[in-house]
Image (cartoon, rainbow, N blue to C red):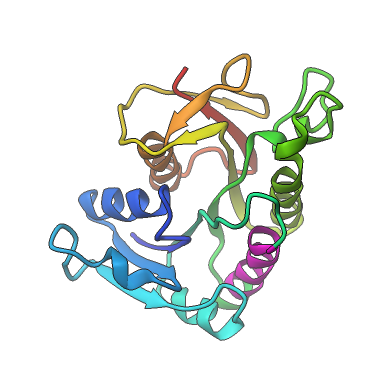
Amino acid sequence: MHITVFGATGQVGRRIVQQGLNRGFLITAFGRNVESLIDQDNRNDHLIARKGYIFDAGDVAAALDHADAVISVLGGAFDGSDKSRSLGMKNIIAQMKKKGVERIVALGGLGVLNTPDNEYLVNDPDYPEEYKPVGIEHLKAFEQLNASGLNWTFYCPPNIIDADETGLYLTSVTYPAVAGIGAINAGDLAHAILDSVAKNEFIHQRVGISNS
């Protein structure tokens, strides 16, 4: 399987690249500073480092050459001011459709899951104000995916810890995996995302995940 990873140099993205290579996948890693991924641990013929800009249609299209699936773990400013998540997703979707690539697993945030009353958490009056700007960016990205016609999965993690995988985590559909905010290791999040691609799981579903 050939997977294109957008946001490949972030704390989740770089673990997806390494874990994907360990699984024997072909990986095209896309990013503005993607050269930083190339080291003695992952220098092999299964890794293509593709330097590019997420808002450039040509760069994104080129990164999708030969891809069977896409993983998007785009980051951006915490205040949501740079629109990398929403506008980047718009460009990815457009180029996937042109290239005929149908499968994408994308990273969002906890606010795109549902409350018990089936409202988005980010719209709940009790949702922390400091998380709302980035939560709205994640929601905009999800709404584009939901309307895209692609075979999407949208992971909605709580706080992401910069730590390796343990293999001990919970997932749920539509609602948070645990009561309260929770937390997830970046390595475990990477593992779950790759599993969803490899096993074709959680099609057209929002997924909550947490270590505890």
Task: Please say if 89 is above or below 167.
Answer: below
Q: Tell me the quarter of the picture where residue 44 sits.
A: bottom left
Q: Residue 4 location, x and y as percent?
A: 42, 65
| Image quadrant where one finds the N terminus | bottom left
| Residue positioned most to the left | 40
Q: Residue 77 location, x and y as percent?
A: 62, 56
Q: Residue 33 location, x and y as percent?
A: 40, 71
96 left or right, relative to 81: left
Q: Which residues are magenta?
A: 82-96
Task: Please say if 124 is above or below 10.
Answer: above
Task: Please say if 102 is above or below 156.
Answer: below
**Which residue is nearer to you in this view: 128 or 121?**
128
Asked if residue 19 lies in the magenta stretch, the reply is: no
211 left or right, relative to 143: left
| Residue positioned most to the bottom | 58
Picture residue at 57% right of the left edge, 17% below the top: 178
